[in-house]
């Protein structure tokens, strides 16, 4: 399990003082996101891959497909799985070895935002009912953690899935050929949903936190939103840290999430589906 970053009291007080004036150390306002940069096709061995940068926070996300036996209670549905790796190369606060609580939570929050939106049509991943289905893997690798890994991973997963192509399946030999088809994953573009994470720091709700801001926040709330006829709809939520969310906090967060969604959704959808 990763150790927590310790922020000196003087630094914490400076962050709180700046936020009370509506400012941050990197010149952003409390509700402002860092610039999003997307680099496609960074892995030759994945069905799709993307490198996402939110400021200095960077993640690599890849999509791989395999063959699997369907679950007994869903014999005509493919499967979907998200995993995350967070090693010391991304932050000295991470440790080597089996995935810690940070990696587990990152993968689960990313998974829930995609799964609950209904983006992947798992029925169309069936090859032979009860016998053979496609299994979709999303692998997240933290390259540099400068805060807000949740949103970087969510955006990367969506873009990677949107650009993935099915590999060739040799039915006679029951194996995957090392060549991609022109067939995209069966996705419902109309329900595309991505995550936005907000923290309570002092008396401010802050979007897209940096690493030091993240360390001193009272609570974290990640909201996945998709499209509902031009208006945002909530598809999933996940709270983190021990602080209590008041009614006023929730109202502020929902308003910020709605505004952020309207700004970011067209950009992310274009990266995912062109």
Image (spheres, rainbow, N blue to C red):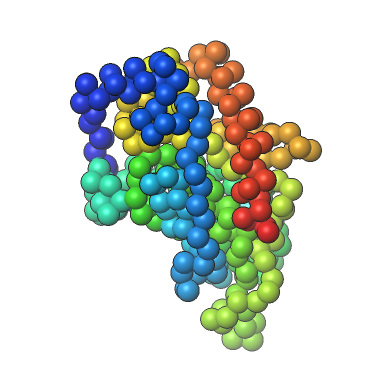
Task: Tell which of 150 and 106 is nearer to you.
Answer: 150
Q: Quadrant of the C terminus?
A: bottom right
Residue at 66% x, 53% y is: 270
Asked whether residue 48 appears in the rendered view, the answer is: yes
Residue at 64% x, 30% y is: 258
Task: Tell which of 217 and 123 is nearer to you.
Answer: 217
Asked whether residue 222 appears in the rendered view, the answer is: no
Residue 62, percent from left and from top: 49, 62
Locate residue 142 relative to residue 33 in the image: left or right.
left
Q: Residue furthest bottom?
A: 172
Q: Residue furthest right?
A: 229
Residue at 47% x, 40% y is: 34
In the depicted structure, whether residue 53 falls above or below residue 22:
below
Task: Tell which of 177 and 47 is nearer to you.
Answer: 47
Q: What is the quadrant of residue 243 in the picture?
A: top left
In the depicted structure, whether residue 128 falls above or below residue 53:
below
Locate residue 125 relative to residue 39 in the image: left or right.
right
In the depicted structure, whether residue 72 falls above or below residue 247:
below
Residue 49, percent from left and from top: 51, 63
Q: Quadrant of the N terminus?
A: top left
Residue at 66% x, 36% y is: 262
């Amino acid at each position: 399990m990763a150790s927590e970053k310790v922020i000196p009291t003087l630094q914490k007080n400076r962050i709180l003082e700046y936020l009370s004036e509506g400012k941050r150390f990197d010149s952003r306002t409390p509700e402002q996101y860092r610039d999003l940069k997307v680099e496609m096709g960074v892995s030759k061995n994945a069905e799709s891959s993307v490198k996402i940068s939110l400021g200095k926070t960077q993640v690599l996300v890849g999509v791989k497909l395999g063959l699997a036996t369907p679950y007994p209670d869903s014999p005509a549905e493919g499967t979907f799985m998200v995993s995350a790796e967070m090693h010391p190369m991304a932050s000295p606060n991470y440790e080597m070895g089996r995935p810690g609580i940070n990696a587990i939570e990152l993968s689960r929050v990313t998974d829930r935002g995609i799964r609950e939106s209904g983006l992947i049509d798992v029925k169309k991943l069936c090859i032979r009912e009860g016998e053979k289905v496609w299994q979709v893997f999303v692998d997240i690798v933290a390259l540099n953690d400068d805060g807000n890994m949740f949103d970087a991973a969510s955006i990367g997963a969506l873009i990677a899935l949107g650009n993935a192509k099915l590999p060739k399946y040799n039915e006679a030999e029951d194996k995957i050929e090392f060549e991609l088809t022109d067939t995209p994953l069966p996705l419902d573009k109309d329900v595309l949903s991505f995550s936005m994470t907000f923290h309570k720091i002092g008396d401010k709700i802050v979007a897209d936190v940096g690493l030091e801001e993240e360390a001193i926040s009272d609570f974290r709330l990640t909201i996945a939103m998709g499209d509902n006829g031009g208006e945002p709809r909530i598809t999933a939520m996940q709270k983190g840290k021990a602080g209590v969310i008041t009614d006023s906090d929730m109202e502020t967060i929902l308003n910020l999430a709605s505004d952020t969604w309207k700004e970011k959704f067209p950009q992310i959808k274009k990266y995912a589906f062109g």
